[in-house]
Amino acid sequence: MITAYVRSLITRFFRRAQTENDLENELRSHLRLRADTLEQSGLTRAAAERRARLEFGSPERFKEECRDTIAGNVIDTLIQDIRFSFRMLRKSPGFTLVVALTMALGIGATTAIFSVVDSTLLHPLPYPHPEQLVQIMDDLPGVGAKDVGMSVPEWWDLEASGIFEYVSPIGGGDVNLTGSSQPARIAFLNVSPNYFALLGVQPELGHTFNPDDRTPGFTLEVILSDNLWKQSFGGDPAIIGKSLRLDNDLYHVIGVMPPNFRDPLRTTRQRNTDLWAASGLAAAPAPDPVRNVRILTEAIGRLKPGVTISAAQNHLDALVRALQKQFPGDYPAKSRWTVRLVPLKENLVSNVRSSLMLLFGAVGMVLLIGCVNVANLLLARASARGREMAIRRALGGSRKRLMQQLLTESVLLSVIGATAGVVVLFGVKGFLLRLVPDSLPQLNSISISWSVLVFALLASIAAGVLFGLAPALQVVRPDLAAVLKLDGRSSTSSKEQGRTRRVLVVSEFALSLVLMIVAGLLFRSFWDLLKVRPGFEPHNRVAVRTWLPLPNDRRTDIYGTPAQEEPLLREILRRAKTISGVEEAAIGNVAAVPLAHDRNNLNPFPLIVEGHDTPPDQAPVVYGALATPEYFDLMQIPLLQGRSFTDADNHQGAPVVVINETMAKTFWPNGDPIGERLKLSIAGERSIYAWNTIIGVVADVRTESLAQGSNPQFFFCAYQRRPRDLAIFLRGHLDRATIESRLREQVQSIDPELPVFGTGTLDAAVSESLAQRRFSIEIVGLFALTALVLAGIGIYGVISYIVSERTHEFGIRLALGAERRNILQMVLRQGLRLAIAGAAVGLVGALLVSRFLATLLYGVPPTDLLTFSGVGLLFICVALLACYLPALRATKVDPVIALRDP
Amino acid sequence: MSDETEAELLPGTLDLLILKAVSLGPLHGYGVLSRIEQISGKRLLVEQGALYPALFRLVRQGLLKTEWGKSENNRRAKFYEVTARGRKRLQEEKEWWERSAAAITAALAARPQEI
């Protein structure tokens, strides 16, 4: 039976002409045979033929019914409908264009944001079984410390606990790479040998670390990133086995990772890992593995298959309690040590979730507004075609067929629009990606995947059916007589339609008002943020990075003590000042570069303050930096009390420290901090640093972001320590493009193995810190503007329609002596009524929605009067403007024509 | 007009009659009409409009096949022929019809005393 069906189908499509021919021939032969029979019973040929035709009935209906039974009819009618719809759409190009554009905008925008959301929020982890990946964090809530890091014996305990398949600590930083084309400063990740097995990824070349490797120190193998391989080694195909030096230690390459691989905790474009090295973290350069020495700052784990996170957490809590009992000295009860598991995905997306959701909401609004607009337009069009539909029905068309045709038309419209939208999307993809700030997690490249395209297609079809349904149902009504009688003037359904359209326009207005108010609030808070003083002067200041190597064998370190390093620092400063354009120079460590921090460089230190008796593992954490004496002057950080560093504060002088205002207020709220002493509890290091005396208090600097208040911060003098990660600060009118190479020349003339890199102006650092907010505002603002335009178009459409409805009435009024001015006022008043209704609803809606924005607003209350009233007024003006044109048209009505044409 | 009472064609029986008519020998559409009239003793007249859709449906279901040929008067016409499957279906339908008819007849012959 199926073969017969298929054969029938094939015949229908591929030999379509023949099929039609056959039908025609069969009909003719039937009629002939019938005529023959009739002729035999006595009629003339002509009469017989005529009788046969009459008997048979309409040949078209015969053909139609036969076609219905042959297979593939549905597809045939569909194709017919599509062809017809195309013709109809071509006839009214204005309408088609507007609808297509609206759909393009709505669906294109939604799809774009969806693809961003998809790759950053929904599926941010491109590893096998990502739900098993967790981040492991140690907290000491008893002393108010979170994420304090883990010790090596704890790591071993976790691995042996049976909860995890693998646990890998992650550390790292920067290192000097030599033995490649040029000395470079690269970002490396120090992991345990099971790291890649944990993630489940394969290298592009060579192989990864052996997960069973038990070397206590560094295995002398490294894995390169694709980027590093191409940039520093020219993509050398014989790279495997080649050796290189990291901080002067010899390693060899065993593998290269694929180009799109990223580490789960190094997600942002700011810090791509260049190289991976594995170590057991139990031998030099790591300190001896001691239980309360928390050297492992980050750790991730893969749960055993089938273990849920809550089960794992419970198991872990039990383990923690057991360890606390077993080692009471290392885990004092007061600190309440806990170990927390956080799903890796959660960790990644939590701080961007709110802004992305905001975006999605904004886009959803625009789409909704677009939909309302389209619905309006379709309704208007449907009512215009009411007569056409009635006639077609009277001629025998079935309701079903007519509705199918109307729906096909609206689906076709919206698919055209969606296609246009997707095409536009491909075009602006590059632009869109550039807008996305670097701090958004991007493990996957944000691309337009198939699922996104399918989503767009489905959305457009759904939209098309949705809009098409209401007008289709309205138009295909049973009372034909009524429709046919009213010659083209408003039919009985128009009143209802008019009301629907008015309701639609009011809602459209309300929606766009909400969007604009949201945009306004965001904008105001951004504006306020811009005015926040960062605490230092960013103009004309540049920071350039360099890094002193830290070889595994400390004896070969030429900058091993402050005494050895001081001459280097001073020489760098001296030579830097010889560069033309440089007015002042200072050196600090990278923590002294404000606002350019990513989490790893801002190391919190447990602090011991003399007179505040707290045991070392419960010490409060503060942020610290190192700087040379010129630093505070160069950055224009005002000194509030005491003095700042001088040249006498070097390895021969007494250890000193400068603290910031917040720290002074936190620890010495009532007294004078000058002269007090503090010490760092750097776990593990036999403290060669004695107590430091506080000599001065400086003003606060915003370190992490402009929106966050100041943290307590201290500064040591660079000459009293041996900073590795240096930032050379320069003040002057400097050419950003050439300053790095000129400084490199100077620095490498002292020590040719020092890399010089990472030049950034402090102005850029300030604006970068605002980048994510700016992105949100740009996008939301764009959408709000679009919404405004759409709403304006909507109200224009409705008022035009109302005007055309009332043309007759206006004609009468004018004939009876009304002034054209009165007509104008009438129309404007009607438009104003609609606008005010929309604004009222919109304001209420905005009040409800804005409270969800509270986290994203800075310094602006969600019910800010200025924003609300300002935007409301703007809207009324736009509405009036949109009404003006049709109102003007109304005044130009020629009473004679209006009266004549009912 | 015939002087015998014309019976109305029960719905669903058209297919059965067409199959029977064609099974007696290949026929064109008009011929099927005549033959049904003939074999039913002029008691069943098929409406012309209903015939061809039914024929096409049977072809689609694989119970009939078609071929163009020449009629008695040397006119070109499309002839329908029964397929093997069609014959089988005809047999099944015939048996079903006879069973149904027997059952209904028996029911209608019931007398009050048999209850």
Image: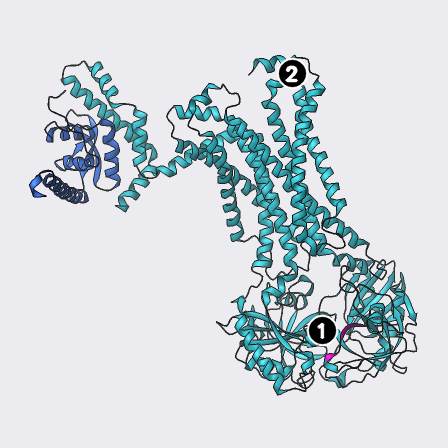
Chain colours: A cyan, B blue
In the image, residue A633 sits, relative to residue B98, either above or below, namely: below
The residue at the point 62 percent across, 36 percent down is A506
Discs 1 and 2 share one subunit: yes
Residue at numbered disc 2: A813
Horizontal side of A79 relative to A8 (left or right) equals: right
Looking at the rendered structure, the kind of residue marked 2 is: Arg
Residue at numbered disc 1: A144
Tally the marks: 2
The residue at the point 49 percent across, 18 percent down is A487
Let me know if residue A625 is in the magenta part.
yes
What is the x, y in percent for residue A837?
Answer: 65, 36
Q: Quadrant of residue A647?
A: bottom right
**Whole-Å distance between the Cαs marked 1 and 2?**
79 Å
What is the x, y in percent for residue B76?
Answer: 21, 27
Looking at the rendered structure, the kind of residue marked 1 is: Gly
Label 2: element kind: helix
What is the x, y in percent for residue A5?
Answer: 29, 43
Q: Which mark is residue A509?
A: none
How dense is the environment of label 1, judged by Cα within 10 Å: few (below 14), some, or many (20 and up)?
Answer: few
**Mark 1 vs mark 2: which is more N-terminal?**
1
The residue at the point 42 percent across, 24 percent down is A480
Label 1: element kind: loop
Q: Main SS type for the magenta part?
A: strand
In depth, the one of B111 and A27 nearer the eye is: B111
Image quarter of the N terminus of chain A:
top left
Q: Chain letter of disc 1?
A: A
Q: Chain letter of disc 2?
A: A
Region in magenta: A618-628
Let me know if residue A663 is in the magenta part.
no
Horizontal side of A362 relative to A857 (left or right) equals: left
In the image, residue A154 sits, relative to residue A364, either above or below, namely: below
